Amino acid sequence: MQLHVSRDIEAPAHRVWELIIDIEHAPEILSGVERVERLDDGAAFGVGTRWRETRTMFGKQATEEMEVTTVEPERAYTTVAQHGNTRYVSSLRVEPLDEGRCQLAMTFEGTSSSAVGRILTATVGRLFAGSTRKMVEQDLHDIAAAAEASTTD
């Protein structure tokens, strides 16, 4: 399963970047995130930054361990999470549009290494894809709202 979601934001790219790398404050920004626990030394955001993120999905709490694997400073980063036989890769990218505006895009992909997982993805994966798309769209909405609110202060 792979999806790509984007939205324009009425805020400068550098402000959106600051929000998306502020892992510790994600529960205050993202309505879908309940808790975040840093697992590294709390140093500056970069390759190797690790945390546990807890969300409620399908009526149950789900906690995933995330690790940043690539960073383009001020522009994009990718995280990887492993849950059982499924590997999740998420990428966030900020593109300046013009003065004071940018586009935020997220790509999300889940890949199973087991035959059963691949069959489930092919058969019921579409149900999960719709819910995952809504979750990602809500995350982008929440980031946009925080960025736009901070530019009017």
Image (spheres, rainbow, N blue to C red):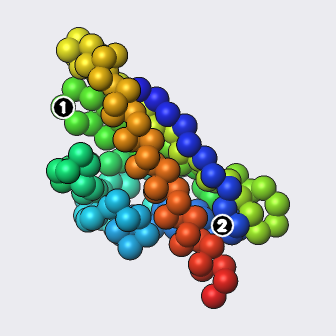
The quadrant the C terminus occupies is bottom right
Rounded to the nearest angstrom, the CA distance separating label 1 from label 2 is 36 Å
Q: Position of residue 104 (x, y in %)?
A: 61, 53
**10 Å neighbourhood of mark 2: few (<14), some, or many (≥20)?**
some
On the image, the x and y values in percent for residue 16 come to: 60, 65
The amino acid type of the residue labelled 1 equals Gly
Residue at 29% across / 23% down in the picture? 124
Q: Residue at x 39, y 41 (%)?
A: 132
Residue 39: x %, y % from top left:
25, 59
Assess whether mark 2 and mark 1 are in contact (beta carbons under 8 angstroms). Answer: no
Which quarter of the figure has residue 150?
bottom right
Q: Secondary structure at mark 2?
A: helix
Question: Residue at image x 26%, y 49%?
Answer: 57
Between discs 1 and 2, the one toward the N terminus: 2
Image height of 100 relative to 53, above or below: below
Q: Which residue is mark 2?
A: 14
